[in-house]
Image (cartoon, grey):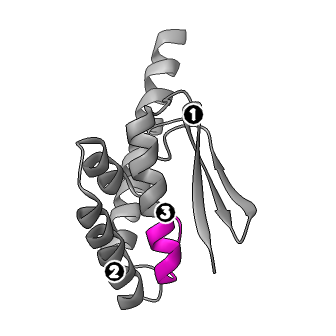
Amino acid sequence: MMIEYKLIDGGYEIYVNGAKTIYQPHSPTRGLDVLLTKEEAERLAKLICKKLELGDSAVINSSEEAELLAGVADTRIQEIAEHSLLEHSRGNGESQSTITGLEKEVRDLKEMIGQLLTDKASNLT
């Protein structure tokens, strides 16, 4: 399998065997309006390619992106990809800590929404 990347304005594209499989015109974790520099896009694209070469998911998490934005060597990109594969293989794609973290985020969001609705109701009276 041949995996390559191409840099585009604000992001990158990933090609598998010549077919475009990923179009990422912005930061994968920081929002649609956050465009990447050429250097940032290249490091992220390299990580995606390494992950796919290892048979892992192409998903980038915020801690991986943050480390890559700080600037790392290609050897560290390889290590990040290998660590990601190890984490995914431990829990069949999802580790318990990820699930626990998501559950906490949902609880926090519910609490914030409840507070916003309470504040809105009190402002209407």
Q: Nearer the viewer, residue 37 or 97?
A: 37
Q: Residue at x 62, y 74 (%)?
A: 2
Residue 87 location (% of width, % of height): 33, 80
Q: CA distance from mark 1 to mark 3?
A: 18 Å
Residue 87's disc number: 2
Residue carrying label 3: 48
Instruction: Please say if the residues under marks 2 and 1 sit with CB atoms less than 8 Å apart.
Output: no
How far across and down, in percent of the image, does residue 7 sit? 56, 42
Q: Is residue 88 above or below residue 39?
A: below
Quarter of the rendering containing residue 60? bottom left
Identify the residue at image location x=57%, y=55%: 5
Residue extending furthest right?
19
Q: Secondary structure at mark 2?
A: helix
Q: Residue at x 53, y 74 (%)?
A: 52
Residue in the foreground of this view, choosing between 104 and 44? 44
CA gap, disc 2 and disc 3: 16 Å
Q: Indicate the amino acid at tag 2.
A: Glu
Number of marks = 3
Residue 56 is at least partly visible in this image: no
Q: Amino acid at mark 3?
A: Ile
- Quick check: 35 left or right of 64? right
The segment highlighted magenta reads 49-58
**Image coordinates for residue 6, horizontal then vertical, percent:** 60, 48
Could you say which disc has been placed on residue 122 in the image? none
Magenta stretch: helix, strand or loop mostly: helix
Q: Amino acid at mark 1?
A: Leu
- Is the residue under label 3 in contact with that under label 1 (CB below 8 Å)? no
Q: Earlier in the sequence, mark 2 or mark 1?
A: 1
Q: Which mark is residue 32?
A: 1
Find out whether residue 47 is within the magenta segment: no
